[in-house]
Image (tube, rainbow, N blue to C red):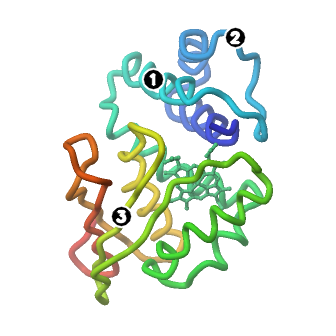
Amino acid sequence: MYGMVNLAIQEFISQRFGDPVWQDIKKRAAPDISHFLTMEQYPDDVTVGMVNVAAEITGEKLPSLLDAIGEFWVEFALRSGYGELLRIIGTTLPETLSNLDNMHTRVGLSFPDLKPPSFWCTEVTDHSLILHYQSEREGLGQMVPGTVRGLAAMLNTTASVQQIADREDGADHNRYLVTFGTEREG
Ligand code: HEM
């Protein structure tokens, strides 16, 4: 995984739990790495390890930590030079979610070895859709609800996200019911 993702996780952990906690986590999950570089690639185990160790040390549940990291990721990308790229792909949540693959393809121009996930939408209505997520990687599906809420915030709307199929339970890929722009969601 490119260092940009690890740097976002590092910043998230430091902000939320403080720098000493981050130093502890880094010592355990990435002892041989002095600092992450945005464009450098690191083993996926390092990324997943950091989040696992963070959950262990802080007592937070892993899924809720991944969810919060997903939300943070959008905000991090917006202020890391990718704001325009994120904003031009859509003005509504369905449009933006449907264009994430195009966006990652563009991102791949700067990150040549990118192995991006794939997202697509079905059953789109004015206030709901099914979001499909497919990845070569395992264990990051819990980030998706947070990223969707982050994108909704970027678009000045709100979304609630419920996972309805999980690859870890034998489904072909993960699916999420996304409800947006209604009075009821939270
Ligand atoms: C323009 C802003 C964005 C940039 C620059 C970006 C870049 C990246 C990079 C560098 C990776 C690591 C992949 C690798 O190293 O092979 C990644 C992975 C990922 N991205 Fe994006 N991304 C952006 C926006 C988004 C958004 C808005 C979503 C929301 C749905 C998203 C979802 C993911 C997920 C879930 C992964 C984890 C890898 C996986 O699931 O296989 N990204 N992205």
Mark 1, ligand 1, within 8 Å: the answer is no
What amino acid is found at the position of numbered circle 1 in the picture? Ala
Residue depicted at 73% across the width and 28% down the height:
36
Q: Quadrant of the N terminus?
A: top right
Residue with the most extreme bottom position: 126
Residue depicted at 42% across the width and 24% down the height:
52
Mark earlier in primary sequence (3, 1): 1
Secondary structure of residue under mark 1: helix
Alpha-carbon distance for marks 3 and 1?
A: 28 Å
Secondary structure of residue under mark 2: loop
Residue 167 image position (x, y, % from top left): 28, 46
Secondary structure of residue under mark 3: strand
148 lies above or below 44: below
14 lies above or below 143: above
Mark earlier in primary sequence (1, 2): 2
134 lies above or below 155: above
- What label sits on residue 163 in the rendered view? none
Q: Tell whether label 1 touches label 3 (CB within 8 Å).
A: no
Q: Quadrant of the C terminus?
A: bottom left
Residue tagged 1: 54
- What label sits on residue 132 in the rendered view? 3
> Residue 178 is drawn in which quadrant?
bottom left
Residue tagged 2: 32
